[in-house]
Image: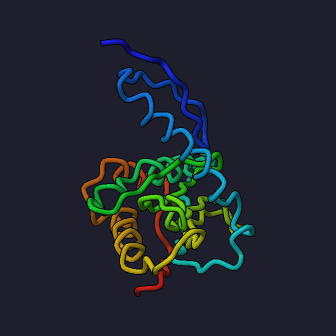
Protein backbone atom coordinates (compact mmCIF):
# COMPACT_ATOMS: atom_id res chain seq x y z
CA UNK A 1 0.00 0.00 0.00
CA UNK A 2 1.35 3.43 -0.91
CA UNK A 3 1.20 6.07 1.84
CA UNK A 4 0.92 9.76 1.15
CA UNK A 5 2.09 12.34 3.66
CA UNK A 6 -0.07 15.44 3.70
CA UNK A 7 -0.46 18.40 5.97
CA UNK A 8 -3.82 19.44 7.37
CA UNK A 9 -4.34 23.01 8.50
CA UNK A 10 -6.20 23.42 11.78
CA UNK A 11 -6.94 26.51 13.82
CA UNK A 12 -4.10 25.73 16.22
CA UNK A 13 -1.29 24.28 14.12
CA UNK A 14 -0.22 22.14 11.22
CA UNK A 15 -0.51 18.44 11.90
CA UNK A 16 1.18 15.89 9.58
CA UNK A 17 -0.96 12.89 8.73
CA UNK A 18 -0.08 9.62 7.01
CA UNK A 19 -3.01 8.51 4.91
CA UNK A 20 -3.40 5.57 2.51
CA UNK A 21 -3.24 6.73 -1.11
CA UNK A 22 -6.77 5.48 -1.89
CA UNK A 23 -8.21 8.02 0.56
CA UNK A 24 -6.49 10.99 -1.10
CA UNK A 25 -9.74 12.62 -2.34
CA UNK A 26 -11.42 12.21 1.04
CA UNK A 27 -8.46 13.88 2.75
CA UNK A 28 -8.40 16.71 0.21
CA UNK A 29 -12.10 17.36 0.91
CA UNK A 30 -11.40 17.23 4.65
CA UNK A 31 -8.60 19.80 4.28
CA UNK A 32 -10.95 22.09 2.37
CA UNK A 33 -13.53 21.71 5.13
CA UNK A 34 -10.98 22.68 7.76
CA UNK A 35 -10.25 25.92 5.94
CA UNK A 36 -14.01 26.59 5.76
CA UNK A 37 -14.44 25.67 9.43
CA UNK A 38 -11.78 28.20 10.43
CA UNK A 39 -13.75 30.93 8.69
CA UNK A 40 -16.85 29.98 10.72
CA UNK A 41 -15.08 30.36 14.06
CA UNK A 42 -14.81 33.34 16.38
CA UNK A 43 -11.60 34.63 17.93
CA UNK A 44 -12.85 36.59 20.96
CA UNK A 45 -16.05 36.88 23.00
CA UNK A 46 -16.49 40.36 21.47
CA UNK A 47 -16.74 38.78 18.01
CA UNK A 48 -19.70 36.85 19.37
CA UNK A 49 -21.39 39.71 21.24
CA UNK A 50 -24.65 39.10 19.38
CA UNK A 51 -24.57 35.34 20.06
CA UNK A 52 -26.32 33.83 23.07
CA UNK A 53 -24.27 32.87 26.13
CA UNK A 54 -24.98 29.22 26.92
CA UNK A 55 -22.67 28.77 29.90
CA UNK A 56 -20.60 30.92 32.24
CA UNK A 57 -18.43 29.40 34.97
CA UNK A 58 -16.40 31.42 37.48
CA UNK A 59 -13.51 29.62 39.15
CA UNK A 60 -11.29 30.67 42.03
CA UNK A 61 -7.64 29.72 42.05
CA UNK A 62 -6.64 27.61 45.08
CA UNK A 63 -4.48 29.32 47.70
CA UNK A 64 -0.78 29.29 46.80
CA UNK A 65 -1.26 27.97 43.26
CA UNK A 66 0.22 29.65 40.19
CA UNK A 67 -2.55 31.47 38.24
CA UNK A 68 -0.89 30.75 34.87
CA UNK A 69 -0.64 27.05 35.66
CA UNK A 70 -4.28 27.02 36.83
CA UNK A 71 -5.37 28.68 33.57
CA UNK A 72 -3.35 26.08 31.67
CA UNK A 73 -5.06 23.23 33.56
CA UNK A 74 -8.55 24.60 32.80
CA UNK A 75 -7.59 25.08 29.14
CA UNK A 76 -6.24 21.51 29.01
CA UNK A 77 -9.45 20.15 30.55
CA UNK A 78 -11.55 22.07 28.02
CA UNK A 79 -9.45 21.07 25.02
CA UNK A 80 -9.42 17.38 25.98
CA UNK A 81 -13.09 17.15 26.92
CA UNK A 82 -14.70 14.21 25.04
CA UNK A 83 -17.34 16.13 23.06
CA UNK A 84 -17.79 13.23 20.62
CA UNK A 85 -18.62 10.84 23.49
CA UNK A 86 -21.39 13.15 24.69
CA UNK A 87 -22.93 13.27 21.20
CA UNK A 88 -22.17 9.91 19.55
CA UNK A 89 -24.60 10.39 16.63
CA UNK A 90 -24.04 14.12 15.98
CA UNK A 91 -21.31 14.65 13.41
CA UNK A 92 -19.04 17.30 14.85
CA UNK A 93 -15.55 18.65 14.78
CA UNK A 94 -13.72 20.33 17.60
CA UNK A 95 -10.64 22.40 17.16
CA UNK A 96 -8.51 23.70 20.01
CA UNK A 97 -7.93 27.43 19.74
CA UNK A 98 -4.80 29.46 20.40
CA UNK A 99 -6.35 31.03 23.51
CA UNK A 100 -6.98 27.74 25.34
CA UNK A 101 -10.59 27.37 24.24
CA UNK A 102 -12.34 25.06 21.81
CA UNK A 103 -14.37 25.66 18.69
CA UNK A 104 -17.01 22.91 18.41
CA UNK A 105 -18.66 22.78 14.98
CA UNK A 106 -21.76 20.72 14.24
CA UNK A 107 -21.64 19.17 10.79
CA UNK A 108 -24.13 18.09 8.16
CA UNK A 109 -23.96 16.79 4.64
CA UNK A 110 -23.05 19.66 2.33
CA UNK A 111 -25.66 20.60 -0.27
CA UNK A 112 -25.89 23.26 -2.99
CA UNK A 113 -27.97 25.46 -0.69
CA UNK A 114 -26.15 24.83 2.59
CA UNK A 115 -22.54 24.38 3.64
CA UNK A 116 -21.19 21.55 5.77
CA UNK A 117 -21.18 23.55 9.04
CA UNK A 118 -24.48 23.59 10.96
CA UNK A 119 -23.62 25.99 13.77
CA UNK A 120 -21.69 25.10 16.87
CA UNK A 121 -20.35 26.32 20.19
CA UNK A 122 -17.25 28.31 21.14
CA UNK A 123 -15.59 27.71 24.52
CA UNK A 124 -13.51 30.63 25.85
CA UNK A 125 -11.13 30.11 28.80
CA UNK A 126 -10.01 33.49 30.12
CA UNK A 127 -8.61 35.07 33.28
CA UNK A 128 -11.26 37.21 34.95
CA UNK A 129 -10.90 40.65 36.53
CA UNK A 130 -10.97 39.25 40.11
CA UNK A 131 -7.90 37.07 39.67
CA UNK A 132 -9.84 33.89 38.90
CA UNK A 133 -10.70 32.03 35.71
CA UNK A 134 -13.83 32.30 33.60
CA UNK A 135 -15.15 29.76 31.11
CA UNK A 136 -17.72 31.19 28.73
CA UNK A 137 -19.56 29.22 26.07
CA UNK A 138 -21.29 31.06 23.25
CA UNK A 139 -23.55 29.71 20.54
CA UNK A 140 -22.14 29.86 17.02
CA UNK A 141 -25.21 30.18 14.81
CA UNK A 142 -23.30 30.60 11.54
CA UNK A 143 -24.73 28.13 9.06
CA UNK A 144 -27.37 26.88 11.49
CA UNK A 145 -30.65 26.10 9.76
CA UNK A 146 -32.51 24.55 12.70
CA UNK A 147 -32.00 25.02 16.42
CA UNK A 148 -29.44 22.79 18.11
CA UNK A 149 -30.75 23.54 21.61
CA UNK A 150 -30.96 19.89 22.70
CA UNK A 151 -27.43 19.18 21.47
CA UNK A 152 -26.11 22.32 23.16
CA UNK A 153 -27.86 21.34 26.38
CA UNK A 154 -26.22 17.89 26.45
CA UNK A 155 -22.75 19.35 25.86
CA UNK A 156 -23.16 22.10 28.48
CA UNK A 157 -24.51 19.74 31.13
CA UNK A 158 -21.78 17.14 30.52
CA UNK A 159 -19.07 19.82 30.63
CA UNK A 160 -20.50 21.22 33.89
CA UNK A 161 -20.69 17.73 35.44
CA UNK A 162 -17.06 17.13 34.55
CA UNK A 163 -15.69 20.44 35.71
CA UNK A 164 -17.60 20.14 39.02
CA UNK A 165 -16.24 16.63 39.68
CA UNK A 166 -19.32 14.57 38.86
CA UNK A 167 -17.55 12.55 36.14
CA UNK A 168 -14.68 10.06 35.97
CA UNK A 169 -12.52 12.13 33.64
CA UNK A 170 -8.88 11.95 34.69
CA UNK A 171 -8.22 15.56 33.65
CA UNK A 172 -10.96 16.85 35.97
CA UNK A 173 -9.35 15.23 39.02
CA UNK A 174 -6.08 17.14 38.62
CA UNK A 175 -8.05 20.32 37.95
CA UNK A 176 -9.32 20.54 41.55
CA UNK A 177 -5.78 20.91 42.90
CA UNK A 178 -5.66 24.30 41.17
CA UNK A 179 -9.19 25.70 40.97
CA UNK A 180 -12.57 25.54 42.66
CA UNK A 181 -15.86 26.41 40.97
CA UNK A 182 -17.43 29.46 42.59
CA UNK A 183 -20.44 29.98 40.30
CA UNK A 184 -22.15 28.33 37.36
CA UNK A 185 -24.81 29.78 35.12
CA UNK A 186 -26.25 28.05 32.10
CA UNK A 187 -29.42 28.33 30.10
CA UNK A 188 -30.85 25.05 31.37
CA UNK A 189 -30.49 25.55 35.14
The N terminus: image quadrant: top left
Q: Residue at x 38, y 48 (%)?
A: 174
Q: What sort of colour scheme is used for the picture? A: rainbow
Query: In the rendered image, which quarter is residue 85 located in?
Result: bottom left
Whole-percent x, y for residue 156 in the image: 41, 71
Whole-percent x, y for residue 50 in the image: 69, 79
In the image, residue 102 above or below residue 138: above
Which sits in the foreground, 131 or 117? 117
Q: Classify residue 108 as left or right of residue 67.
A: left
What is the tally of numbered marks visible in this picture?
Answer: 0
In the image, residue 48 above or below residue 68: below
Which sits in the foreground, 122 or 140? 140
Residue 62 appears anywhere in the view: no
Q: Residue at x 57, y 42 (%)?
A: 32
Q: Classify residue 11 as left or right of residue 49.
A: left
Q: Residue at x 58, y 52 (%)?
A: 37
The C terminus: image quadrant: bottom left
Query: In the rendered image, which quarter is residue 24 located in?
Result: top left
In the image, residue 35 above or below residue 107: above
Amino acid sequence: MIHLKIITLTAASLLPLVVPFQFNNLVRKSCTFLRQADSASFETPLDMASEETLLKIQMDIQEGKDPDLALEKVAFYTQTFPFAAVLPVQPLQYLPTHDGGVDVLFLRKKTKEKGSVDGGMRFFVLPDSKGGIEVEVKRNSKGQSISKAFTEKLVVQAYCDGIMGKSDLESSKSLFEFVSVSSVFHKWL
